[in-house]
Amino acid sequence: MKLTRRGFFVLSSAILSSIILKDKSHATSGKYATLIDITRCDGCSNEPLPKCVLACRVQNKVRFPEPKKPIIPYWPRKTYEDWSDKKEKIDTLTPYNWIFVQKLQIKGKEIFIPRRCMHCDNPPCVRGCPFGALTKRPAGNSVINEKICFGGAKCRDVCPWFIPQRQAGVGIYLHLLPKFAGGGVMYKCDLCKDKIEKGEEPACVVACKDRLKEKSVFLFGERKTIYELARQRAKDEGLFIYGDKQNGGTSTLYLSKVSFDDINKALIEKRERFKMPVEVKNKIQTTFNPIGKVVISSGFLSIIGAVVAAIISKHKEKGGDENGR
Amino acid sequence: MAGKIKRHSIIEILEHWILAISGIILIFTGLGCLPLFKRYYIAEIPGLAWTGDFNTVTTVHYIASIFFVMAVSFHIFYHGIRGEFGLLPKRGDFGQSIKVLSAMFGIGEEPPSDKYLPEQRLAYVGMGIVIVVITLTGIIKVLKNLEWIVLSPNVESINTVIHTLSGFVFMIAFVIHVGIVICFKSNWPLLKSMFTGWIDEDYVKQRHSLWYKKIKNEISEMEK
C-alpha cells in the first residue's frame, strides 16, 4: 500500500489525537458524579461505625501503607508523618481512612457530613504534582499513583480542602535519597477506581444504599443526571448545594438544609481540620490561565517579530552589498 | 572601534540575557514548585516567605516563562531564516572540544577555532535540545491547563515528568555553562563580549584564528 504525504499526515493526526484526545467528552469534567445528601445522613448512629467508612476501609485495606521502620525524619526537619500506629482512627482523614463523617451541632440540630476527596473538575493536586503521580480520569475521579508518588505533599497544600494524607516510610523515595527528598506516599479516595472502571459503584455508595435503600445519603451516577437532580431538589425543597461552583466545579455535590456558610462557621468554631469554605477559587482558572494565554500569544508574536526582523535585516544587508559593489 | 572586533549583535545579546535571566527565575521557581523551599527553611529567609506558597511560586514561574518562550521562539526563527548556523556542530567537534577543555587545564595546546569554540557548538546543541524539550512540555502544560488541548491521563503524567526532569538537566547544564565561563580566565573576554558585543582583536587573533582569517579575507575582498 502506497502512503501519500497527505495520507501520512491524516494517519499521524488520527494516531496522535487518539493518544492525546482520548475520551475527550469526559476528560475535563468527568463522566460520573456523586450526590451526598446530608439531610438524610445520621452518621449511622445505631452502628459501631459509619457504613461508608467501614466499606471504604474494607475495600481499600489491601492498598493501605505498610511503612518500613524505623522511619527517617524529613531532613533537615526532625519530623515525619506516621499514621501507622493510628490505623483505627476514623474521625478524620488519614492514609488508612479515606472517608470520615463530621458531626456538627447547628442551631440545636445535629448534622453529619461524610467527607472525602471532592474530585474537582480542574484539580490543583493533579495539575500541580511535579512527578505526574496524580491523574484525572475520564470517569471524573482523581487518582494517586502510589508507585511514583514521592510524598512531597504538594497535592495537600494546593487542595482547598487539604484532603490527601501522607504516610512516611513507604514509596519510591526510599530508593533514591530518603533523607533529603520525598516524604512517603499520599493517600486519598479515588472513588474506588477499579470498581467504577468495571461499571460498579464506589464501596461507600453501595454500603449506604444497603442500609438506607431509596433514602440513601449517597447517589452515584452520570454527572449530568446527578447535577440536574441536585439542582431540582435544591429548588423544590429549598436546599443548599455545595461542590458545583467551588474550585471551579467538582464531581461531588452536597445537599443541605443548613447553609454551607453556617456549616463552615461551625467547622471553624469546632477547629476542624477539614472545612467547607463557600468561596473557593480555582487558582489555575483565575490566576495561571490568564498568564498562560499571554505565554502562548507572546510566543506567536515573537515568531512573527523574528520573521519580519530577519527578512528586513537580510534585505538591508543585500542592499548594502549591492551598494558596496 | 580600534583593536576590537564585533562578536555579537544587539539582538544576540538581548536574546542571551533574556533567556539567562528568565532561565534563572524559572530554575528557582521550578525548584519552588517541588516541595523543597518550606522543608529546607528557604521560605523562612527574610524576603523569601513567598517561596513557601505554591500559588505565588507558580505565578512567578508562569510570568518568567513569557520571556523565556519569547526568547526561544525569536532565536529559532530569526537565526533560522537568516541562515546563521555557526553555532551548530561540525565534524570533528568532539575531539577538538577535548583538546580545548584540556588546554583550559594547561594540558596541550588549544586548536585554532572559528567564531565559536568546538565545545561551545556542542554545548549549544545540548543546551538547545534541553531548552526545546523544556519549552515544548511547558507549553503543553499551559495548553492543557487552559483546556485548549485535552490529554489522556498517562500522556499528561509523562509530559509532567519530562518537564520536571528536563528542568533538572537544564539546571545542571546552566551551572556548568556559568562555571566554565567564570572559572577559566581564558573565557573572561567572551563574557565581556556578551555584554558589549565587542572583543579584543588580539584575543580573536590568538584564540579564534580561523575566524580572524575569514574576517581579514572579507576585508581584503571588500577593498578589492
Image: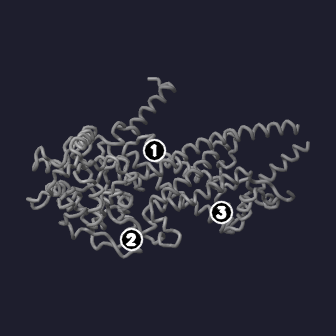
Q: Which mark is residue B146?
A: 1
Residue B200 found in image quarter = bottom right
Task: Find the residue positioned furthest to the front.
Answer: A107
Please tell me which of labels 1 and 3 falls first in the chain. 3
User: Camera-side residue: A3 or B32?
Assistant: B32
- Please indicate whether residue B126 sits to the left or right of residue B145 in the image: right
Residue B45 position (above or below residue B73): below
Residue B59 position (above or below residue A34): below
Q: Secondary structure at mark 2?
A: loop
Is disc 1 in contact with disc 3, using a CB cutoff of under 8 Å?
no
Is disc 3 in contact with disc 2, using a CB cutoff of under 8 Å?
no
Q: Mark 3 vs mark 2: give the one in front.
A: 2
Asked if residue A80 can be seen in this view, the reply is yes
- Please indicate whether residue B222 sits to the left or right of residue B104 in the image: right
Residue A79 found in image quarter = bottom left
Q: Mark 2 vs mark 1: give the one in front.
A: 1
Mark 3 → mark 2, Cα distance in angstroms: 36 Å
x, y (%) of residue B204?
Answer: 78, 58
User: Identity of the amino acid at label 3?
Assistant: Leu
User: Identity of the amino acid at label 1?
Assistant: Leu
x, y (%) of residue A30?
Answer: 31, 42
Task: Find the residue positioned furthest to the left.
Answer: A46
The residue beneath circle 3 is B101
Q: Which mark is residue A179?
A: 2
Which chain is home to disc 1? B
Which residue corresponds to the image point at 37% horizontal and 54% vertical from the top-left?
Answer: A280
User: Identity of the amino acid at label 2?
Assistant: Lys
